[in-house]
Amino acid sequence: MDYIEVLGLAAAILTTAGYVPQVYKTWRDKSTKDISLTTYLVLFIGVVLWLSYGILISSLPVTLANGITAFLLLFMLILKFKYK
């Protein structure tokens, strides 16, 4: 694994981890009143497109980061509808 791949993995870990506190807080508090449905829908669609791109170019950092982020965003959307 070269340094560029390591850089990509580090970026993937950090940007994906940024969603974890919001998901945890929303799940713990069972409240989504301050969460924008439009924002999370747009982010989810964008991340799914990035995931598709990562798969097509066989990029582990892009695929990994966006796969996990898509899961976190989908979970947030589910919570948004559940606790509406």
Image (cartoon, helix red, strand yellow):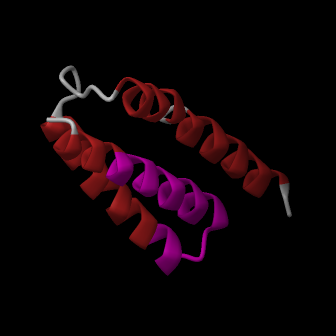
Q: Nearer the viewer, residue 22 or 14?
A: 22
Q: Please give the name of the residue rendered at 71% of the width and 42% of the height, measured from the top-left corner.
A: 10
Instruction: Tell me, yes or no, whether the highlighted magenta stretch contains residue 5.
Output: no
Residue 44 higher or lower than 52, as above or below: above
Quarter in which the C terminus is drawn: top left
Provide residue 52's location: percent of width, then percent of height: 40, 72
Q: Is residue 38 left or right of residue 1?
A: left
Q: Residue shown at 47%/50% (left/top)?
A: 69
Residue 25 pos. (x, y %)? 44, 25
Q: Main secondary structure of the magenta part?
A: helix
| Direction from residue 39 to residue 7 in the image, left or right | right
Q: Is residue 28 above or below residue 56?
A: above
Q: How many marks?
A: 0
Q: Is residue 69 magenta?
A: yes
Is 3 placed left or right of 52 in the picture? Answer: right
The residue under the point 13% across, 39% down is 38
Q: Nearer the viewer, residue 84 or 55?
A: 84
| Lateral position of residue 17 relative to residue 80, left or right | right
Q: Which residue: 21% across, 20% down?
A: 34
Image quadrant where one finds the N terminus:
bottom right
Q: Name the one closer to the observer, 49 or 20.
A: 20
Looking at the picture, does residue 38 appear above or below residue 44? Answer: above
Q: Quadrant of residue 49?
A: bottom left
Q: Which residues are magenta?
A: 53-75
Image coordinates for residue 43, horizontal then vertical, percent = 29, 45
Residue 37, x across and y down, in percent: 16, 38
